[in-house]
Image (cartoon, rainbow, N blue to C red):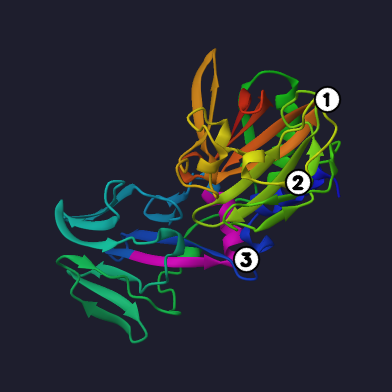
Amino acid sequence: MSFLKVIAVIALLIFSSPKASFSDYGEAFLYIGCNHEENTFEVNPLVIWNDDLDRIVKTVDRGYGVIDNKDYKLIRMYGRNNFETSCSFKDLTIKVNLSSDEPYLKLYINNNFLTKYHIFTIQNWVHSYPFRYKDGSWEEFNTNGWTFINIGGNEKDWRDISSVEDPFKVLSKFEYTDDPMLFKELVSTGGVCSHSLEIVNQLFINRVPDIIASGSVGNGKFITPNGDPYEVMENPALFDFDNDGVEDQVFMYSNAGSYLNGDLLYVAYGERESSKRKEKLFIDDIHIFPCQFDPTVDSSTSCPTVGSKANEAGIKIFFKDNAKSIFFRGRYTDVGSFRYEDKTYLLLRSRFLENGYYAAVIYPHDKTKYDSKCLFKRMP
């Protein structure tokens, strides 16, 4: 399999839903309802699984993480660090607030603080008992049905459960679309952008793009200094990574964890004066990307996962004649390589939640430099 097809398959697995990697997959959501028919305020932390998640995710994307049906909201919690909504009936207003400066979901009644729930790991949020405000008191729905709870006071814990009936029938309160929210051009500098826009959208809708593959697979080993992520990485792709006319060795590592959610490329640059290629490479022979596209990084030993000094390094996409700029954090970026008009380009897609709807194309050159070529964003 050629290098580009390897990239395409890996990107397909990463860009698509989690079912590509796991038998069961789910995401944490918070349902908040303002039920004016019954004068109740409803809260349900939940995990939506498998086919149900597939059914709603396109609508969630189109709402940038929120499905809003006026009185009812379904909020995607993965990576979210702020939102606010309120519910009013009769002479009462209940407000829910999650602020970026504190990891708490806070409840207020008529602007008076009531209580707060600690959001300790939003990405792995557990099921919890639903609760509601009704007729002047708070109730939770557990295995005994609706029971009174004293919700006032300081910090509360989410009630961890394995399963419970959904008393609000959350998913039935919303309508869903079958149309994916695709990438559109924000900034284009030429033909490579229309070409790569087609690639990123084909990847996103789970179709491997029909494009000309580049490079071949060679022999060689990269020995990581600390055995993490692998003690030995073998069989690098062989292609001209930085467009200097010399073939380079490129090793790729992908992960989908909390520390690294994306791709790393380990590049050993070829020498114009010599056709000999090292068969055993160490950290001093390697550049690590996206990390070393950041001008503040002076050594591969600073880069994840080898070192931690450059944990926040990344790629700033900017254009001279356009004020728009986006920062792609290196630890949370998918990276794919493709050839266009006999040149190498890199296709980036952010997996960092603040910029998670963006993709970009860069032109690498002079080992650690690059030019911004295209900027895309998924938009309705």
Around disc 2, counting alpha carbons within 10 Å, would you say few (fewer than 14), some (14 to 19), or many (20 or more)?
A: many
Q: Main secondary structure of the magenta part?
A: helix
User: At 14% across and 66% down in the image, what residue appears?
Assistant: 153
Write the residue at 21% across / 76% down: 149
In the displayed structure image, the side of residue 221 where residue 257 appears, left or right: left
Q: Is residue 119 left or right of residue 279?
A: left
* Camera-nearest residue between 258 and 125: 258
Closer to the camera: disc 3 or disc 1?
Answer: 1
Residue 371 image position (x, y, % from top left): 62, 22
Amino acid identity at mark 2: Ala
Q: Return the residue at label 1.
A: 342
Q: Amino acid at mark 3?
A: Asp
Q: CA distance from mark 2 to mark 3?
A: 25 Å
Looking at the image, can residue 329 be seen? yes
Residue density around tag 3, few if under 14, some if 14–19, many if 20 or more, within 10 Å = few
Stretch of the chain drawn in magenta: 43-60
Residue 8, disc: 2
Residue 90 is drawn in which quadrant? bottom left
For marks 2 and 3 on the same chain, the one whose residue lies earlier in the sequence: 2
> Where in the figure is residue 341, as x and y percent of width and height?
82, 23
Residue denoted by label 3: 51
Few, some or many residues within 10 Å of mark 1 (<14, 14–19, 20+): few
Three-letter code, disc 1: Asp
Image position of 281 with respect to 29: above or below: above
133 vs 232: above or below: below
Secondary structure beneath label 3: helix
